[in-house]
Image (cartoon, rainbow, N blue to C red):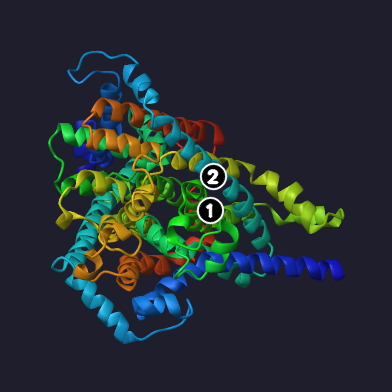
């Protein structure tokens, strides 16, 4: 009995330590913009300052380079949402065609998709840059949106969904009823795709929103940056971590609270998507995407 | 009507639905790979260079240090994933459902902050003047100012910790899902045979999710070698303390951008691409976790 209790205690202690490790930095980030730069150093790390400080930090952040921060958020929304829309428009039909079609090259397309899906996305960034550079497409927003739209994981999710969740008898019945291939897809297969649309949206949006490497490499104008690259740009222009910037901090008014606020606002859209989908995800839909 | 028309044209079933995807697969998947390969084996003027670009970049004084950095980083990260992700998933599996779901969710939250945001947060966490973990920084790293926290020797461990912080929760969910596929009768039988919780966890459950662990490790290894965001951002914040060619990918980036040496950059990109490709091919052909057939 004593050993059992000890085991239980050890288990709880381990889980608690890890919960603190995963959550404390997030809590700190949420509280940091409520304090002044000075209070961040002097007061307790998890204390609450005031909403007035948040407003002030926002004013400083928003004034930075003539509303550049808003621009970055808007850019990220445009890149992420348009790429995700293209991804959905491509991958739902393609997954359907790959699952229920019979044509030469189907196996090859599936295998290539799988291989590219499992390869780290970063491994294709420099090759894509070299290709776009040769085509003189560097600096265009399409050199971010179009590569983002190529999302093999979305194709695979749609493929697995149609291959396992839709009985082919259902589609055959539609065909017997006189629906052509296109009508069968639109009237039967597409309305059934809701769960997989949500899943592809989640993974594609989050991947696009957080992507740093590709836009960093293919965009040159800071007005075109997404927020990830913007954050690194902001970081480089404050003396908070980099004393070399020197007086720069005073002139741009970007100190630690502003930087924390910029980081916090940058993750809110992804956090919302996470919260909306956490139940489905934590329940193990992730694992369900894969043959067991 | 439509069915007849389709049959008349002999369009293979399903193909029209896949067609819009093909340009993307070709332009952003296959073509860049082939083009990088071509650049890697040619000179600036397009003449055949053989393995020259590979040996030249290998001999670059920055190549071996960068490669060592990402190797140490990857090994530390993989070790942490293997021990803690598997350990935590086993700990959570078989707990009361609601408690377990809460922990899984808490562990998963940092995943929303992946990439640049996570790096900025951890720069704060590593700054002893503001960090809630300042006492740990002092006791474990002996750091009382930020520059000491990000001393070169600490960096592989710091990057491994950031990667673990953002990614471990997702893997715990995957491992937990894999553990749930183990039939309860099997566990029950082991318990009747007198197996304790430790024996069940390590002798029964662990071998049954071996495939998933291998999958996680191969995937993370390939991903780890690609390290770019973390050192690039830390370099911006480091007062020139951290080299801008800290990781192999950064070196390739610098070759392309600072020296316009696209052939050299392509050679390094191909080195890394091959690691990723090899990992992917092993997973697809050997693990049986993914299906490409009915």
Between B258 and A42, the one lying in front of the other is A42
User: Left or right: B123 with respect to A148?
Assistant: right
| Image height of B204 relative to B27, above or below | below
- State yes or no: discs 2 and 1 in contact (Cβ < 8 Å): yes
Q: What percent of the width, then of the height, locates residue B37?
A: 30, 24
Percent of width and height locating residue A41: 42, 75
In which quadrant of the rendered view does residue A152 lie?
Answer: top left
Look at mark 2 in the image and give the residue it sits on.
B216
Residue nearer the viewer, B101 or A46: A46
Q: Are marks 2 and 1 on the same chain?
A: yes
Q: Circle 1: is it few (<14), some (14-19), or many (20+) Cα within 10 Å?
A: many
Q: Chain of mark 2?
A: B
Q: Earlier in the sequence, mark 2 or mark 1?
A: 1
Element class at badge 2: helix
Pointer 1 residue: B171
What residue is shown at x 67% (from left), y 60% (from top)? B91
Q: Which of these two is toward me, B15 or B209?
A: B209
| Residue A257, percent from left and from top | 33, 73
Q: Is residue B290 visible?
A: no
**Residue occupying the point 29% across, 38% down:** B253
Gap in Å between the C-alphas at discs 2 and 1? 8 Å
In percent of width and height, residue B206 lies at 69, 48
Q: Secondary structure at mark 1?
A: helix
Q: In the displayed structure, does residue A137 sit left or right of residue A269?
A: left
Residue B37, relative to residue A162: is it above or below? Answer: above
Determine whether A154 is above or below A48 in the image: above
Label 2 Cα crowd, 10 Å radius (few <14 / some 14-19 / many 20+): some
Q: Residue at x 30, y 68 (%)?
A: A262
- Is residue A33 in view from this perspective? yes
Q: Quadrant of residue B78?
A: top right
Q: Residue at x 46, y 42 (%)?
A: B224
Q: Chain of mark 1?
A: B
């Amino acid at each position: 009995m004593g050993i059992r209790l000890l085991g239980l205690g050890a288990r709880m202690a381990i889980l608690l330590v890890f919960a603190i490790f995963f959550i404390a930095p997030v809590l700190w980030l949420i509280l940091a913009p409520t304090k002044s730069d000075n209070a961040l150093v002097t007061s307790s790390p998890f204390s609450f300052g005031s909403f007035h400080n948040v407003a002030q930090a926002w004013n400083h952040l928003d004034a930075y380079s003539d509303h550049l921060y808003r621009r970055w958020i808007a850019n990220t929304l445009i890149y992420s949402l348009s790429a995700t829309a293209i991804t959905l428009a491509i991958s739902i039909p393609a997954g359907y065609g790959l699952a229920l079609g019979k044509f030469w090259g189907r196996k090859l397309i599936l295998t290539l998709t799988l291989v590219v899906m499992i390869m780290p996305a970063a491994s294709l960034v420099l090759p894509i840059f070299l290709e776009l550079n040769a085509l003189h497409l560097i600096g265009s927003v399409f050199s971010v949106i179009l590569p983002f739209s190529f999302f093999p994981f979305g194709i695979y999710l749609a493929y697995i969904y149609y291959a396992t969740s839709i009985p082919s008898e259902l589609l055959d019945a539609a065909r017997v009823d006189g629906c052509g291939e296109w009508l069968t897809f639109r009237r039967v297969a597409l309305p059934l795709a809701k769960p997989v649309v949500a899943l592809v949206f989640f993974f594609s949006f989050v991947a696009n929103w957080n992507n740093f490497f590709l836009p960093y490499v293919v965009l040159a104008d800071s007005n075109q940056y997404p927020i990830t690259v913007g954050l690194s740009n902001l970081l480089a222009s404050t003396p908070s971590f980099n004393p070399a910037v020197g007086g720069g901090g005073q002139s741009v008014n970007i100190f630690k609270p502003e930087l924390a606020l910029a980081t916090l606002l940058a993750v809110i859209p992804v956090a919302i998507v996470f919260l909306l989908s956490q139940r489905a995800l934590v329940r193990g839909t992730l694992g369900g995407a894969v043959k067991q | 009507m439509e069915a007849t028309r389709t049959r008349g044209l002999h369009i293979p079933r399903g193909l029209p639905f896949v067609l819009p995807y093909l340009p993307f697969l070709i332009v952003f998947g296959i073509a860049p790979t082939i083009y990088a390969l071509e650049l890697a084996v040619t000179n600036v003027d397009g003449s055949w260079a053989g393995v020259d670009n590979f040996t030249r970049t290998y001999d670059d004084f920055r190549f071996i240090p960068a490669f060592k950095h990402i190797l140490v980083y990857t090994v530390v990260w993989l070790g942490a994933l293997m021990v803690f992700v598997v350990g935590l998933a086993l700990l959570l599996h078989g707990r009361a459902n609601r408690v377990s779901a809460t922990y899984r969710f808490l562990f998963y939250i940092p995943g929303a902050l992946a990439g640049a945001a996570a790096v900025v947060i951890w720069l704060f966490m590593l700054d002893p003047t503001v960090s809630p973990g300042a006492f740990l920084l002092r006791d474990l790293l002996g750091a009382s100012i930020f520059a000491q926290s990000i001393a070169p020797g600490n960096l592989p461990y710091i990057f491994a910790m950031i990667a673990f912080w953002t990614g471990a929760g997702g893997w715990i969910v995957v491992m937990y899902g894999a553990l749930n596929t183990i039939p309860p009768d099997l566990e029950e039988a082991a318990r009747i045979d007198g197996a304790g919780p430790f024996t069940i966890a390590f002798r029964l459950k662990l071998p049954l999710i071996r495939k998933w662990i291998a999958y996680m490790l191969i995937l993370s290894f390939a991903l780890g070698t690609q390290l770019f965001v973390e050192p690039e951002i830390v370099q911006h914040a480091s007062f020139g303390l951290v080299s801008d060619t800290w990781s192999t990918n950064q070196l390739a980036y610098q070759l392309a951008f600072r020296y316009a040496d696209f052939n050299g950059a392509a050679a390094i990109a191909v080195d890394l691409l091959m690691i990723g490709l090899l990992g992917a091919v092993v997973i697809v052909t050997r693990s049986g976790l993914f299906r490409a057939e009915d």
